[in-house]
Image (cartoon, rainbow, N blue to C red):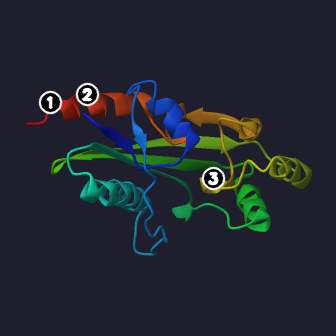
Amino acid sequence: METILASQSPRRQELLRRIVPEFTIMPASIDETIQPDYQPKEYVYAMAEGKAEVIAKTHPFARVIGCDTIVVQDQQILGKPANRMEAFKMLKSLSGTTHQVFTSVVVKQAGKTAALTSQAEVTFYPLTDAEIAAYLDTGEYTDKAGAYGIQGEGALLVKAIKGDFYTIVGFPLAATYRLLRDFEQIG
């Protein structure tokens, strides 16, 4: 059975290889504009489902995996920063506070769909402007929801996490393994 990951994220690819040794990478392009009427869980699910659906339409018999991750502070979705200034503002707002990270994984194959949404909490240390600038100098913030990557230098910003670490990375590994295992048993 062919498995397709509808994501170009190197982190997701690395983690998926732990449970599915061979798969094809086929990033899905969808409109990720944050709509004001979406609740965070609805939005992250819609994005993951949309990515899986785009690829499943042209590969209906493959097992397609779509994913999305968002950072949420005070019910506001923090997407990927457009530039360094926006990233600075995001990190400044996260400084010394606790926020949520949601990751949705949607699997589609031959008209069947299975999904999960995992949530974790991240607390940042209080950050000085110099600490934020030093982190931004790494360039790691680009293409990251909330302007940080916990699996890299961004770990130095984090005081505590509650929940699945891999949810924060963008691919809840154990939950996805179980989702794929159970998906095989759907009739």
The residue wearing badge 3 is 144
| Cβ–Cβ under 8 Å for marks 2 and 1 | yes
In front of the other: 119 or 105: 105
The residue under the point 62% across, 60% down is 80
Find the distance from the CA under tag 3 to the CA under tag 2.
29 Å
In front of the other: 53 or 60: 60
Q: Amino acid at mark 3?
A: Lys
The residue wearing badge 1 is 185
Q: Amino acid at mark 2?
A: Arg
Horizontally, residue 31 falls left or right of residue 137, namely: left
| Cβ–Cβ under 8 Å for marks 3 and 2 | no
Q: Element at badge 1? A: loop
Above or below, comparing residue 109 to residue 88 in the picture: above
Above or below, comparing residue 24 to residue 58 in the picture: above
The residue wearing badge 2 is 181
In front of the other: 60 or 129: 60
The residue under the point 40% across, 60% down is 47
Residue 31: x percent and y percent? 45, 70
